C-alpha cells in the first residue's frame, strides 16, 4: 500500500493532500490561532510567547496525526512553519521520509493538490482525485 502526502502549511492553516493506492484525499486543519500579536500591558511577554508556542505544538500534533503513516512527504509553505513541521516530524516520527521542502506563497486548495499530484506523478505514481475531508 503506497501512501504519499503533501502539506501546505503556515501558522494559521494546513492543507494536506494524501495519496494512497492512487486515490487522492484532501484534509484541512485550521490552527485556530490569529496572527502572533504582541500585547501592551497585561501579561508579560514570556507568558504570551509560551501560550503561542503551546498552541503551535497542539496544531503540529494534529497535522502529524494526519501524516503519520505517509511513506513520503512533500512540505510546502510561505514561512517558517514548514521548517518547524519538518523538525517536529524528525523528532516525533523519525522514520518519516520528507522528499522536499519548497517555499511557495498562498495557494488555493486545488493548486496545492495539483502541485502535490505533479510531484508524485513524476515519481511514477498514478493518481485519481478523491473527495475532500
Image (cartoon, helix red, strand yellow):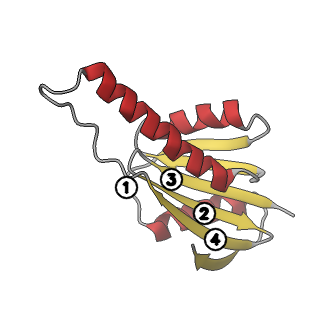
Q: Earlier in the sequence, mark 2 or mark 4?
A: 2
Q: Which mark is residue 35?
A: none
- Label 2 vs label 1: CA separation? 16 Å
Which residue is drawn at the image coordinates 79% and 38% (left, top)? Answer: 95
Foreground of the two, 133 or 114: 133
Q: Earlier in the sequence, mark 4 or mark 3?
A: 3
Which residue is drawn at the image coordinates 74% and 42% (left, top)? Answer: 97
Q: Which residue is mark 3?
A: 8
Foreground of the two, 55 or 80: 55
Q: Which mark is residue 17?
A: 2
Q: Could you tell me if the residues under marks 1 and 3 are in contact, i.e. CB atoms within 8 Å? A: no
| Residue 3 x, y percent position in the rendering | 77, 60
Which residue is drawn at the image coordinates 60% and 63% (left, top)? Answer: 17
Foreground of the two, 12 or 101: 12
Give the quarter of the image for residue 24.
Answer: bottom right
Q: Earlier in the sequence, mark 2 or mark 1?
A: 2
* Vertical comparison of 47 with 2: above or below: above
Q: Is residue 65 left or right of residue 94?
A: left
Quadrant containing the C terminus is bottom right
Circle 1 SS class: loop
- Label 1 vs label 4: CA separation? 20 Å
Q: Earlier in the sequence, mark 1 or mark 4?
A: 4
Circle 4 SS class: strand
Q: Is residue 53 left or right of residue 99?
A: left
Q: Which residue is mark 1?
A: 106
| Residue 46 x, y percent position in the rendering | 31, 20
Q: Could you tell me if the residues under marks 2 and 4 are in contact, i.e. CB atoms within 8 Å? A: yes
| Residue 4 x, y percent position in the rendering | 73, 57
Amino acid at each position: 500500500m503506497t501512501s504519499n502526502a503533501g502539506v501546505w502549511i503556515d501558522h494559521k492553516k494546513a492543507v494536506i493532500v494524501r495519496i494512497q493506492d492512487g486515490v487522492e484525499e484532501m484534509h484541512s486543519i485550521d490552527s485556530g490561532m490569529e496572527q502572533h500579536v504582541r500585547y501592551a500591558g497585561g501579561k508579560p511577554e514570556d507568558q504570551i510567547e509560551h501560550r503561542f508556542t503551546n498552541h503551535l505544538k497542539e496544531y503540529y500534533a494534529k497535522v502529524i496525526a494526519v501524516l503519520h503513516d505517509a511513506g513520503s512527504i512533500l512540505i510546502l509553505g510561505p514561512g517558517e512553519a514548514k521548517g518547524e513541521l519538518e523538525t517536529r516530524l524528525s523528532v516525533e516520527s523519525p522514520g518519516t521520509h520528507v522528499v522536499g521542502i519548497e517555499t511557495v506563497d498562498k495557494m488555493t486548495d486545488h493548486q496545492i493538490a495539483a502541485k502535490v499530484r505533479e510531484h508524485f506523478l513524476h515519481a511514477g505514481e498514478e493518481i485519481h482525485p478523491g473527495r475532500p475531508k
